[in-house]
Amino acid sequence: MIRIVLADDQALVRAGFRALLNAQDGMTVVGEAGDGAQAVDLARELRPDVVLMDIRMPGVDGLTATKTIGADPALDATRIIMLTTFELDEYVFEALRNGASGFLVKDTEPAELIQAVRVVASGDALLSPGVTRRLISEYAARSKSPGTARELGVLTEREREVLALVGTGMTNDEIAARLYMSPATAKTHVSRTMMKLRARDRAQLVVIAYESGLVRPGWL
């Protein structure tokens, strides 16, 4: 059973999501929050598998709440999907940096929302290659220079290559084709890279790839 917490300041939005998700086999909404502070409290109390978190809420916003949850070792198993009105919301990249596993626009189709919850609950990141490229491009356009580079010395040369390709939005199959390896080998390299860099998921690798300078705007 996938246990879900909803965090949105609009009761009508929460009601719609709750009705949809509770109607699915293997899903249940275990809590609702009207702001970020309540979302953090519920996450700590209920240890949900997934939190659907609105970015913009009064008081403690979703970005701050995501950062708090992402920094709590006791909540390592909790995955966060950011909800936003705009696909390229200016805060989305910051949310990914702070621990979110992906994002959805609020008017997404019901089937896409359900699939998103399943994908993130399974431990994967919710970032399509096309959206990843646009997201990095948007972030790069707002930044004069990359952020502080994370130490990449723990990676092998091949793992650095794989990290760079993950950062450009490539899937495992695309990475395998580019580097002349099997998809299973590409997946193994991605998993080892995540482990070495202590990344929660693929979304975190995208952030690391850009901030380390492995991915630059001219590549997109």
Image (cartoon, helix red, strand yellow):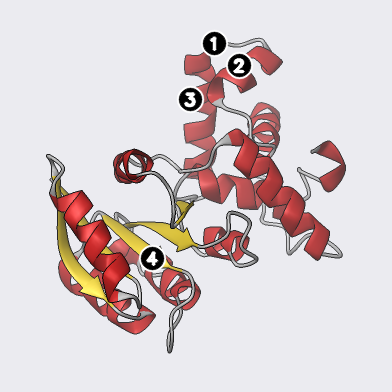
Apparent side of residue 80 relative to residue 144 in the rendered image (left or right): left
The Cα atoms of the two marked residues, 3 and 1, are separated by 10 Å
The Cα atoms of the two marked residues, 1 and 2, are separated by 5 Å
- Under circle 3, the secondary element is helix
Tell me the number on the disc at residue 53: 4
| The N terminus lies in quadrant | top left
The Cα atoms of the two marked residues, 2 and 4, are separated by 34 Å
Between 91 and 21, the one lying in front of the other is 21
- Mark 2 or mark 4, earlier in chain: 4
Pointer 3: what residue?
A: 188
| The C terminus lies in quadrant | top right
The Cα atoms of the two marked residues, 1 and 4, are separated by 36 Å
Mark 2: amino acid:
Ala
- Label 3–label 4 contact, CB within 8 A: no
Mark 3 vs mark 2: give the one in front: 2
Pointer 1: what residue?
A: 182
- Mark 3 or mark 1, earlier in chain: 1
Query: Could you say where residue 200 lies in the image, as x and y percent from the top left?
Result: 44, 50
Mark 1: give few (<14), some (14-19) or many (20+) Cα within 10 Å: some
Pointer 2: what residue?
A: 176
Query: Could you say where residue 15 lies in the image, as x and y percent from the top left?
Result: 22, 65
For residue 65, which quarter of the picture?
bottom left
For residue 131, which quarter of the picture?
top right
- Mark 3 or mark 4, earlier in chain: 4
- Label 1–label 2 contact, CB within 8 A: yes
Query: Could you say where residue 76 lies in the image, as x and y percent from the top left?
Result: 33, 58
- Mark 3 or mark 2, earlier in chain: 2
Apparent side of residue 76 relative to residue 147 in the rendered image (left or right): left
Query: Could you say where residue 140 lies in the image, as x and y percent from the top left?
Result: 78, 56
Mark 4: amino acid:
Met
Task: Check the image and report above or below for 97 versus 126.
Answer: below
